[in-house]
C-alpha cells in the first residue's frame, strides 16, 4: 500500500479505521469492541451519570444507534441505567463496580497501545497533528 497516493480524506478515514482495528485486537480478550470501550470510557470520564443522549453525542452516534450498545453493556453488567425521580423519561448511565474495574484495566492497555503507536512520532509533529484534528473537528461540527 502506497499511502502517499491517498488524499487527505481517504488517509484520515483509513487511519481512523486502522486505529480502531488495533484497539479491537488489543481489547479482544476483554469481550469489548472499540465502540463498547469508547462508551465505557466516556461514562467513566464523567463525575455524574450521563444521559443516553449525551453518550450518543459524545460517540458521534444517533440516539437510536446507541441503545443496542447500551443494552449490551447492561447485559455484560458493566453499565446500569438509572431513572431519575424528576424525569421518568430520562435514563442516566452509570458504570457498575465491574465496569469500573474493567475500565481501569483496559485504560492501561489503551494507554500502552497509544504509546506504542505514537512512539516514533516527533512530539512537536504530534502536537501539530492534534491541533489540526481539533480544528477540523470544530469546523466539521459547525457544518
Image (cartoon, grey):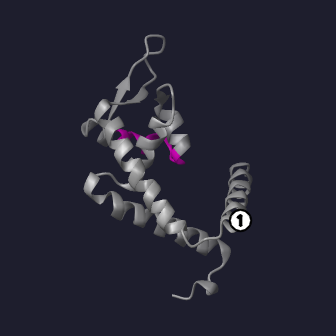
Q: In this rendering, is residue 62 above or below 112?
A: above
Residue 102 relative to residue 15: left or right: left
Task: Point out residue 102 in the picture as x, y percentages from the top left corner.
Answer: 32, 42
Q: Nearer the viewer, residue 62 or 132?
A: 132
Q: Secondary structure at mark 1?
A: helix
Q: Residue at x 48, y 11 (%)?
A: 86
Q: Residue at x 69, y 68 (%)?
A: 125
The location of residue 45, given as percent across then percent down, is 50, 37
Q: Give the quarter of the image for residue 73.
A: top left
Residue occupying the point 34% across, 64% down: 25
* Most common secondary structure along the magenta stretch: helix
User: Would residue 78 appear left or right of 10 to someone viewing this image?
Assistant: left
Name the residue tied to disc 1: 124
- Residue 23 in percent (x, y) is at 41, 61
In the image, is residue 74 part of the stretch drawn in magenta? Answer: no
**Is 100 drawn above or below residue 142 in the view shown?**
above
Instruction: Using the image as rendered, state which of residue 58 and residue 63 is in the foreground.
Output: 58
Magenta stretch: residue 63 in it?
yes
Residue positioned most to the top: 85
Q: Residues within 10 Å of mark 1 (few under 14, many from 20)?
A: few
Relative height, residue 137 to residue 103 (above, below): below
The region drawn magenta spans: 59-70
What residue lies at 49% left-to-right and 60% top-to-bottom?
114
Quarter of the image for residue 89 reads top left
Amino acid at each position: 500500500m502506497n499511502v502517499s497516493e491517498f488524499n487527505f480524506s481517504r488517509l484520515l478515514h483509513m487511519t481512523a479505521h486502522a486505529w480502531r482495528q488495533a484497539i479491537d485486537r488489543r481489547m479482544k480478550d476483554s469481550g469489548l469492541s472499540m465502540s463498547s470501550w469508547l462508551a465505557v470510557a466516556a461514562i467513566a470520564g464523567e463525575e455524574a451519570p450521563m444521559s443516553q443522549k449525551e453518550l450518543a453525542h459524545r460517540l458521534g452516534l444517533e440516539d437510536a444507534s446507541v441503545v443496542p450498545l447500551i443494552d449490551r453493556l447492561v447485559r455484560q453488567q458493566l453499565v446500569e441505567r438509572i431513572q431519575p425521580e424528576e424525569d421518568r423519561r430520562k435514563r442516566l448511565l452509570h458504570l457498575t463496580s465491574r465496569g469500573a474495574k474493567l475500565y481501569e484495566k483496559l485504560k492501561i492497555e489503551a494507554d500502552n497501545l497509544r504509546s506504542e503507536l505514537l512512539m516514533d512520532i516527533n512530539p512537536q509533529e504530534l502536537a501539530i497533528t492534534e491541533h489540526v484534528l481539533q480544528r477540523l473537528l470544530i469546523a466539521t461540527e459547525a457544518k
